[in-house]
Amino acid sequence: MKTTTPSNDTATNATVVHRRYVAFSDAHYAGNLVDGAFALKLFGDVGTNLSIETDGHEGLFAGYSSVEFLAPIRGGDIVEAQATLVKKGNRSRTIDFELRVACRAADDTGRSRLLDQPIIAVRARGTGVLPKDA
């Protein structure tokens, strides 16, 4: 996990990245495809991490303003979920998310390869909110 934290309370562009293996058991469709909800769950985890690091509270997620599914995620892949703080209001936080495939499984035998360029699989923008008492 790589984290960059802002230097002051009004700074944006703080970024948190989580990397994880996608188990073959996570695949639900032909071709070992993983459903889109898998990416959104990872965005929730990395967004919570970002909120804790920037605000000292896990916050609450209000919703997505956009989600783009750009490329498949498959069992056996290694993915990176990234959350970047792009706007900070009094209690609201606008966060950009990106899920990249960093390693791709060759087949279900365990063979895999590190990609020269990660594949951007999912992009999203969402809003997190801090409770009044936070």
Image (cartoon, rainbow, N blue to C red):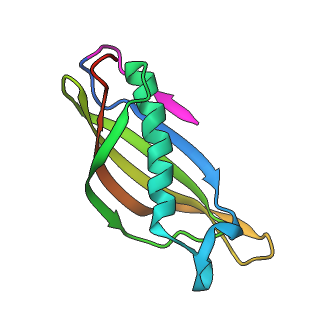
Q: Which residues are magenta?
A: 1-9
**63 over 120 or under it: above or below:** above
Extreme-left residue of the structure: 89
Side of 91 where 107 appears, left or right? right
State the residue at coordinates (19%, 22%): 90
Is residue 69 in view from this perspective?
yes
Question: Where in the figure is residue 54, as x and y percent of width and height?
Answer: 39, 22
**49 over 20 or under it: above or below:** above
Extreme-bottom residue of the structure: 30
Is residue 119 in view from this perspective?
no
Question: Where in the figure is residue 97, as x and y percent of width and height?
Answer: 37, 48
Dominant SS type (magenta): loop
Extreme-right residue of the structure: 109
Is 4 covered by the magenta stretch?
Answer: yes
**Foreground pick, 63 / 72:** 63
Q: How many marks?
A: 0
Question: Where in the figure is residue 42, as x and y percent of width and height?
Answer: 50, 50
Side of 71 where 125 appears, left or right? left
Question: Quadrant of residue 57 in the image?
Answer: top left
State the residue at coordinates (24%, 19%): 10
**58 over 67 or under it: above or below:** above
Is 71 covered by the magenta stretch?
Answer: no
The quadrant the C terminus occupies is: top left
**Foreground pick, 121 / 125:** 125
Question: Quadrant of residue 31 in the image?
Answer: bottom right
Side of 115 where 92 appears, left or right? left
State the residue at coordinates (71%, 67%): 112
Question: Where in the figure is residue 2, as x and y percent of width and height?
Answer: 54, 34
The quadrant the N terminus occupies is: top right
